[in-house]
Image (cartoon, rainbow, N blue to C red):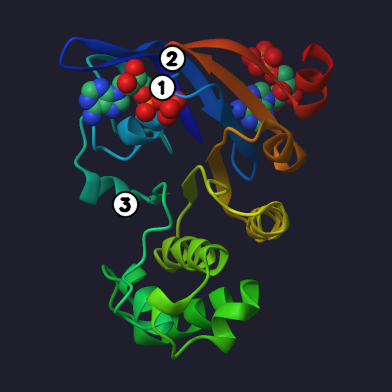
């Protein structure tokens, strides 16, 4: 479904990606692991069109997207849930979710997607009319993921969904990630919490200073640890 071949990317003279090659197969959950500053978020930025690679190729669903604009990429089905539980605090849960459906007009479809997201996140159904700013951190993270789902992703990019959340909430988030995957959404997950990530992943890559320093399925990754 997604293939990166020898991707290089820089911020000014910071050479953040130094030849990244990886692939994500349809219906899988793939993790990008590695220490702070390794280049994980930069991979997600390159995938969503926010940072244009200096060289290399990114192919998604048979089409090269490394020169595409973010709007085009979203329409092709790559949807990013950025780090830091980004919600609109002064809009309700329902309004936040509806914003995720922005580029589509089919009301019946949007309603069906909305019901689907509430099924995946029962707590959002309870809180549908509350302002997003009144939700707990974990609930806001679920809302941010739910908003991403409203855009009907083929590939969902999750940047550090567990960041700053209590362990019990992290477990809940990962259980939801598993549900989303079972319902047919392919997921590329950036995580510092390697153990949690490997539990839900089919395959993982480890990044180190802009390069891939290890890869394998969850079992292989645990054995090599
Ligand atoms: P090759 O590159 O020769 O196809 P790999 O060593 O990359 O083989 O893969 C070994 C196994 O892991 C294969 O079963 C492959 O389908 C699976 N695999 C490899 N990469 C991914 C990925 N990104 N997502 C899911 N499964 C993967
Ligand atoms: P990770 O997500 O693995 O923590 P990043 O992809 O955020 O790593 O960062 C990779 C490298 O790029 C680091 O050296 C980081 O300091 C640098 N970097 C990230 N964002 C910027 C930016 N906006 N401007 C300059 N350098 C950046």
Residue 32: where, in percent of width, then height?
55, 29
* Residue at 70% from the left image edge and 60% from the top image edge: 172
Which x, y percent locates residue 60? 41, 35
Tag 1 residue? 39
Q: In the drawing, does residue 193 fall left or right of residue 144?
A: right
In percent of width and height, residue 162 lies at 58, 48
Task: Kindly check if marks 1 and 2 are in contact, taking CB atoms under 8 A apart as contact.
Answer: yes
Q: What residue lies at 31% left-to-right and 80% top-to-bottom?
A: 91
Q: Earlier in the sequence, mark 3 or mark 1?
A: 1
Q: Residues within 10 Å of mark 1 (few under 14, many from 20)?
A: many
Q: Quadrant of residue 67?
A: top left
On screen, residue 39 above or below 150:
above
Q: Residues within 10 Å of mark 3 (few under 14, many from 20)?
A: some
Residue 44, placed above or below residue 98: above
Left or right: residue 125 compared with residue 102? right
Residue at the bottom extreme? 129
**The C terminus, quarter of image:** top right
Badge 3 vs badge 1, beta-carbon distance below 8 Å = no
Label at residue 121: none
Q: Which residue is mark 3?
A: 74
Mark 2 crowd level (few <14, some 14–19, many ≥20, 10 Å Cα): some
> Residue 50, can we see it?
yes
Residue topped by disc 2: 20
Mark nearest the camera among 1 and 2 is 1
Assign a secondary structure to mark 2.
strand
Looking at the image, is 49 positioned above or below residue 221? below
Locate residue 105: give its quadrant: bottom left
User: Ligand 2 shows up in which quadrant of the image?
Assistant: top left
Give the alpha-carbon distance from disc 2 to disc 3, as whole Å: 22 Å
Residue in view at x 22 percent, y 15 percent: 54
For ligand 2, tell me if the residue under mark 1 lies within 8 Å. Answer: yes
């Amino acid at each position: 479904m997604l293939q990166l071949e020898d991707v290089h990317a820089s911020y000014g003279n910071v050479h953040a990606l130094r030849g990244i090659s990886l692939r994500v197969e349809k219906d899988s959950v793939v993790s990008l692991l590695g220490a702070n500053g390794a280049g994980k978020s930069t991979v997600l930025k390159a995938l969503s069109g926010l940072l244009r690679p200096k060289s290399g190729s990114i192919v998604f669903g048979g089409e090269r997207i490394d020169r595409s604009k973010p709007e085009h990429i979203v329409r092709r089905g790559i949807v990013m849930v950025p780090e830091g539980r980004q919600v609109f605090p002064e809009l309700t849960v329902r309004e936040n979710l509806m914003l995720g459906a922005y580029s589509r007009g089919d009301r019946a479809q949007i309603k069906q997607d909305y019901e689907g997201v509430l099924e995946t996140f029962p707590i959002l159904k309870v809180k549908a009319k509350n302002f997003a700013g009144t939700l707990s951190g974990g609930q806001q993270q679920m809302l941010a993921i739910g908003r991403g789902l409203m855009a009907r992703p083929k590939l969902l990019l999750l940047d550090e969904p567990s960041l700053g959340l209590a362990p019990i909430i992290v477990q809940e988030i990962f259980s939801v990630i598993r549900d989303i995957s079972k319902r047919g959404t392919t997921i590329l997950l950036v995580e510092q919490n390697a153990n949690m990530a490997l539990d839900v992943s089919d395959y993982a890559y480890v990044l180190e200073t802009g390069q891939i320093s290890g890869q394998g399925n969850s079992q292989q990754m645990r054995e090599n640890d």
